[in-house]
Image: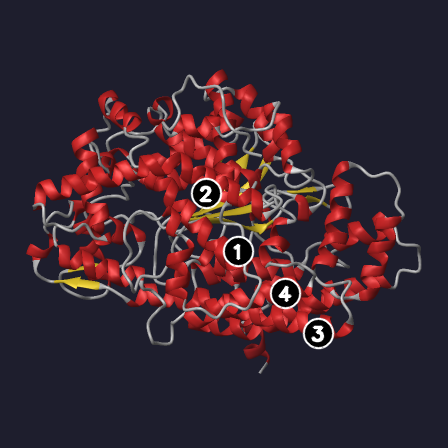
Amino acid sequence: MDEKISTATYHTNPFLEAYPTPHETVPFDRIRFEDYEEAFMEGIRRDNEALDNIINDPEEPTFENTIARTDTSKGEHYYDLLDRVSTVFSCMLSAETNDQLDQLAQKLSPILTRHANDVALNSRLFARIKHVYEHHRPLTPEEQMLLNNSYDGFVRSGALLCDSDKDKLRQLTEEASLLSLQFSQNLLKETKAYELHITDEAQLDGLPDTAREAAATAAKEKGKEGWIFTLDSPSYSPFMTYSTQRQLRREMHRQHSTRCTHDNDYCNLAICERLVNLRREVAQLLGYQTYADYVLEHRMAGNTGRVYQLLHDLIAAYKPTALEERAEIEALAKRLEGDDFVLEPWDMAYYTHKLQMEKHAIDAEMLRPYFKLENVIRGVFGLATTLYGITFHEREDIPVYHPDVKAYEVLDRDGSYLAVLYADFHPRKGKQGGAWMTEFQGQWIDRRGNNVRPHVSLVMNLTKPTDEKPALLTLTEVETFLHEFGHSLHGMFANTRFQSLSGTNVWWDFVELPSQFMENYAVEREFLRTFAFHYQTGEPIPDELIDRIIKSRNFMAGSSCLRQVSFGLLDMAYYTLREPFAEPIIPFEQQAWAEAVITPQQPEACMTTQFSHIMAGGYAAGYYSYKWAEVLDADAFSVFREHGIFDQETAQRFRQEILSKGGTEHPMTLYKRFRGQEPTIDALLRRNGILPNTTDNGQQAQ
């Protein structure tokens, strides 16, 4: 009996103790499924205990004993257990989920929302915060921002409502939280459920070797003969661009554009309608006319009028160019197929590629051999080393949640520890589409004065290696890498006192500045020369090919801009509604973005049911942020162009004034401190070729 006890495996929930790993990183190799629920429940208990300690403090409420403690209080523990388990669980739901995790998420969603409401609607806690808001000592700008955020956050979460309205708010937010989760789960399952299985090699006509090999690998992984194409971007995009099989392109496009509209368990139509109405009801309960009014109160744009002004200004500037681009594509298609040919949505990528080859003699496949993933990693990391002096060192002793994931220790210029960076590059069954940055641990300065450094995760869906070739990326995928890496730098450089103000905890129409800024480097000759070497010969990318990249930079710039603007218009159409939304979604969608859409839509196509950004991703009434931040990033990069794109002095100022400051001050204050003035739309229009480079006049973006 004693021997059995001594040899039995005893499991301790890893969330409940100090992580015995390098830099106290998440011990993914020790986490069991049952650990999540236990940690969540204990985390809620500890949260409530810490809350009781604050509200029962007999001392007069002060910034230190109330505001600072609500942001960084860990109770008797040096970590926030609920935050610790939530970040891991959330990442798994997006990057490595399964049916068990999905079911647990649905079980936990109302519990966690209820707990968040219990905190936000606690009248005794709000009374202390209100007292500090009205009676406080002189504060630093960061302290003042935290105080303002704390007070406003409670007010915007219903602290001033009567009890019956608080109960109503609880019901609305719990339902919205669960529906957002269901939306994401449906989209993932619907996307992964479809595959185009080809067994006749003739139907691969036009497809490059990389697409064929990837499809063969996908089939082999599923134990099937032939080739399998999916709706994941690295499979879908090449098929739509290169396949000569128009009927198969039509089938792929139909499946992709109608996701979550079908009469099955994954339909999101009713969910979207309900989410729009729930958010409107929440906003109106809190005293706002629309959900957009509620959201934009804490955005750089400020109000719906300025958002629409930006979107309409962009339509006016870019639509003539987009119409010319559309006419060129249509003319080429008719020249190749005959005057009776009707250009359909599933033809656009195919004939756009042919036009690009005709005008610039360049396409994604020509560049792939020079964008081996390992080289791109060295190039992107090397860019950060050149600009900021930081270095990246792969650590195989840091546990990861999937074999695809790499973990890096990041050191600052002086060799001191800066952050941990996880990089998850490829699509797989349990992983959402798209690309994103998240954190397993944020940055803050604890009560002992220790600067707790962040653990940042970079997640993408880039082309996978095959049996024949390593992972070879497109230029667009390189841009995606740079974009998400920009978010990662924002997180890794965080250097603030309070966790809720650090890193990417900024207003949503400012958060895309660091990411979109990094995209500028993708077409810079000096940057490409640092890593773009042929994966077989080691030869550097030819200057002549770089010339073609630069000359083709603005190819389809008008259409690309209108596409983003159309999404912004759709977003605003939903969230500026003042009355209950009860219209059929597809006709509403087509009318909402009509001003920016120049390609006829198929009657069954629907973006809304797969528009994760505005339904489940936090961008509701905020999708315009991408274009808003594009004005900022073009303006910011113009400073680097003036002083040199690798200028370390300018980079240090960008790091010091923007990347490290998080949300400690108003974003325009931070931007002007870096730039010396507010941005104008000029730099963006010049970069896209809408205005000549010599133009100095431009409309103020802000």
Q: Amino acid at mark 2?
A: Glu
Q: Which mark is residue 484?
A: 2
Query: Mark 1 or mark 2: which is in front?
Result: 1
Q: Amino acid at mark 4?
A: Val
Rendered residue at 65%/36% (across/down): 661
Q: Earlier in the sequence, mark 2 or mark 4?
A: 4
Q: Which mark is residue 620?
A: 1
Rendered residue at 29%/39% (across/down): 323
Which residue is more in the foreground, 390 or 393?
390
Label 4 environment density (alpha carbons within 10 Å; few <14, some 14–19, many ≥20) = many
> Is residue 400 positioned above or below 196 on the image?
above
Q: Which mark is residue 167?
A: 3
Q: Which mark is residue 39?
A: none
Tell me the CA gap for discs 1 and 3. Answer: 23 Å
Q: Amino acid at mark 1?
A: Ala
Q: If the image is split into quadrants, where does the N terminus sit?
A: bottom right
Tell me the CA gap for discs 2 and 4. Answer: 32 Å
Tell me the CA gap for discs 4 and 3. Answer: 12 Å
Q: Earlier in the sequence, mark 4 or mark 3?
A: 3
Tell me the CA gap for discs 1 and 2. Answer: 20 Å
Query: Mark 3 or mark 2: which is in front?
Result: 3
